[in-house]
C-alpha cells in the first residue's frame, strides 16, 4: 500500500533560519512563528537587496525589482535588462543547497511608461537518500521548489506607477513509498502580486534629492498540499512597505537611505498550549485548528491582522524591519550595508548585510555577505552573487563595433 511522505526534515533544515537554533523560552511559551508553505519564495534572490538588510520596496529600479516591487520597472532608466543571481544557501550546514534566479524586464510602448517583466526561481535542497525500516538505503531524491512569473507595470502619472504579477509555483518535497515506477510527488499553486511605487525629486538647499515610497503585496494565491488536501499550507503572502531617500554628497557621489517593513498576511496556526487543559480546551483547540485548515487564503489575509492571542503586542511582533544604505560613485561603483531585524518570538532572524558592486556600460557585478548577530545562526556567512546585463549598453557597444 502506497503512502505519501513529506520530507519535513528537509524543510526544517532548509529553513532553519526561521526557527533559531538557540531560541530561549520566556516561560510563557511565546515563541510562535507564522507557518507557511513554499518558504523559499521569501528568500531575497539578489546581492543588492540582501546587502542592505533584505530591502528593495522603494530603491531605484533594477533588473531584480520583480521580487521587491515590480511597479518600479515603469521608472527603469534602461529599456531592458536581465539579471542572473546565485546564492549558496545554509552553507554552514550543507554544501548542496542553493537558490538560482533569472529576472529581467523590457520597456514597451513609445511613451517610456510601460514594462513587461518575468523571473524564474529554482531552489534546490540537494540530494537526499531515504532510509527503509531496516536501515537500508531507499530512494535517492533531489527535492526542489521553483516558480515562474510574468508581470506588467505602468506609470499612472509622472510620479506614480502600479504593477501586477502572475506566478506559477511548484514544490517537489514529497515522494511515494513503493517500488518501480514511483515518481516524486509535488504540489502546485498559483499566486499574484500587486504593487505601487511613488517617486519625487524635492529640492533641499541647492541640491535635488529623490524621495520614493513603495509597497508590494506578494503571493496572494492558493494553498499548497502534498497529501490530497489533508494538511494544506498557506503561501507566504507578504505585505512590504518601504521608503528611500537619496541625496548628493558631492559631484558624482550619492547616498541613499532606505527602510522596509514586512508582515506576513497569514493567520497564525493555533497551538494546543494556548488553550485550557481538559476536554473543553481540547475541543476548542480542535475547532480552531479545523477553522485554520479550512480558511481561504483571502480570509486568511484579513484574519492575519487580528488572530494573535496576545493582541496588538503580538501583531507588532510579526513585523520585520530592514534598514539599509547605498553609496554610489558616478553610478559605477557601489558600497552597501544594512540590518535585518525579526522579533525573537517570531523567528529571531537578525543579521547585518554588506556588499559592493561595479558597473560598466554593459554588465554589472554585485556581491553581498551576511553576518548574523548569533554565532549559531545557519544564515551566518551567506554569500550572494548577481550578474546584470544592460541591453541599452549592449546595443551601444554593438553599434560602435559596426
Image (cartoon, grey):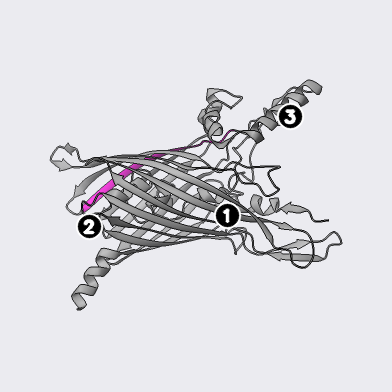
Closer mark to the observer between disc 3 and disc 1? 1
N-term-proximal mark, 2 vs 3: 3
N-term-proximal mark, 2 vs 1: 1
The residue carrying mark 2 is: 330
Residue range (magenta): 253-267
Q: How packed is label 2: few (under 14 Cα within 10 Å), some, or many (20 or more)?
A: few
Q: CA distance from mark 2 to mark 3?
A: 61 Å
Give the quadrant of residue 22: top right
Left or right of 244, for residue 29: right
Q: Nearer the viewer, residue 4 or 277?
A: 4
Residue in view at x 50 percent, y 46 percent: 191
Residue 264 magenta: yes
Left or right of 359, for residue 311: right
Q: Could you say whether the residue bearing mark 3 is in a helix, strand or loop?
A: helix
Disc assigned to residue 292 = none
Residue 171: image location, x then y, percent: 60, 54
Q: How packed is label 3: few (under 14 Cα within 10 Å), some, or many (20 or more)?
A: some
Amino acid at each position: 500500500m502506497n503512502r505519501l511522505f513529506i520530507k519535513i526534515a528537509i524543510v526544517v533544515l532548509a529553513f532553519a533560519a526561521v526557527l533559531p537554533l538557540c531560541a530561549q523560552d520566556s516561560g510563557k511559551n511565546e515563541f510562535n512563528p507564522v507557518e507557511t508553505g513554499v518558504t523559499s519564495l521569501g528568500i531575497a534572490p539578489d546581492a543588492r537587496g540582501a546587502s542592505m538588510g533584505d530591502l528593495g520596496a522603494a530603491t531605484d529600479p533594477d533588473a531584480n525589482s520583480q521580487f521587491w516591487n515590480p511597479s518600479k520597472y515603469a521608472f527603469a532608466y534602461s529599456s531592458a535588462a536581465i539579471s542572473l543571481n546565485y546564492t549558496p544557501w545554509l552553507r554552514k550546514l550543507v554544501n548542496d543547497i542553493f537558490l538560482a534566479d533569472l529576472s529581467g524586464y523590457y520597456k514597451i510602448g513609445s511613451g517610456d511608461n510601460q514594462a513587461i517583466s518575468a523571473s524564474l526561481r529554482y531552489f534546490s535542497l540537494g540530494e537526499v537518500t531515504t532510509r527503509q525500516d531496516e536501515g537500508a538505503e531507499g530512494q535517492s531524491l533531489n527535492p526542489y521548489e521553483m516558480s515562474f512569473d510574468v508581470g506588467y507595470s505602468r506609470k499612472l502619472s509622472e510620479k506614480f506607477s502600479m504593477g501586477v504579477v502572475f506566478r506559477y509555483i511548484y514544490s517537489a518535497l514529497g515522494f511515494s513509498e513503493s517500488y518501480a515506477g514511483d515518481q516524486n510527488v509535488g504540489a502546485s499553486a498559483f499566486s499574484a502580486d500587486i504593487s505601487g511605487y511613488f517617486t519625487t525629486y524635492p529640492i533641499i538647499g541647492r541640491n535635488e534629492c529623490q524621495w520614493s515610497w513603495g509597497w508590494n503585496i506578494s503571493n496572494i494565491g492558493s494553498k499548497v498540499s502534498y497529501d490530497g488536501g489533508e494538511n494544506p499550507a498557506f503561501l507566504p503572502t507578504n505585505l512590504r512597505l518601504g521608503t528611500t531617500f537619496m541625496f548628493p554628497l558631492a559631484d558624482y557621489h550619492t547616498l541613499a537611505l532606505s527602510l522596509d517593513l514586512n508582515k506576513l498576511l497569514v493567520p497564525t496556526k493555533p497551538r494546543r498550549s494556548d488553550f485550557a487543559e481538559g476536554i473543553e480546551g481540547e475541543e476548542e483547540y480542535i475547532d480552531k485548528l479545523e477553522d485554520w485548515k479550512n480558511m481561504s487564503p483571502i480570509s486568511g489575509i484579513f484574519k492575519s491582522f487580528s488572530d494573535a492571542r496576545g493582541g496588538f503586542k503580538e501583531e507588532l511582533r510579526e513585523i520585520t524591519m530592514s534598514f539599509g544604505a547605498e553609496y554610489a560613485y558616478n553610478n559605477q561603483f557601489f558600497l552597501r550595508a544594512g540590518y535585518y531585524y525579526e522579533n525573537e518570538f517570531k523567528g529571531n532572524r537578525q543579521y547585518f548585510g554588506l556588499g559592493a558592486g561595479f558597473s560598466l556600460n554593459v554588465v554589472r557585478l554585485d556581491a553581498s555577505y551576511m553576518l548574523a548577530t548569533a554565532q549559531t545562526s545557519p544564515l551566518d556567512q551567506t554569500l550572494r552573487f548577481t550578474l546584470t546585463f544592460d541591453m541599452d549598453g549592449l546595443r551601444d557597444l554593438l553599434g560602435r563595433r559596426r
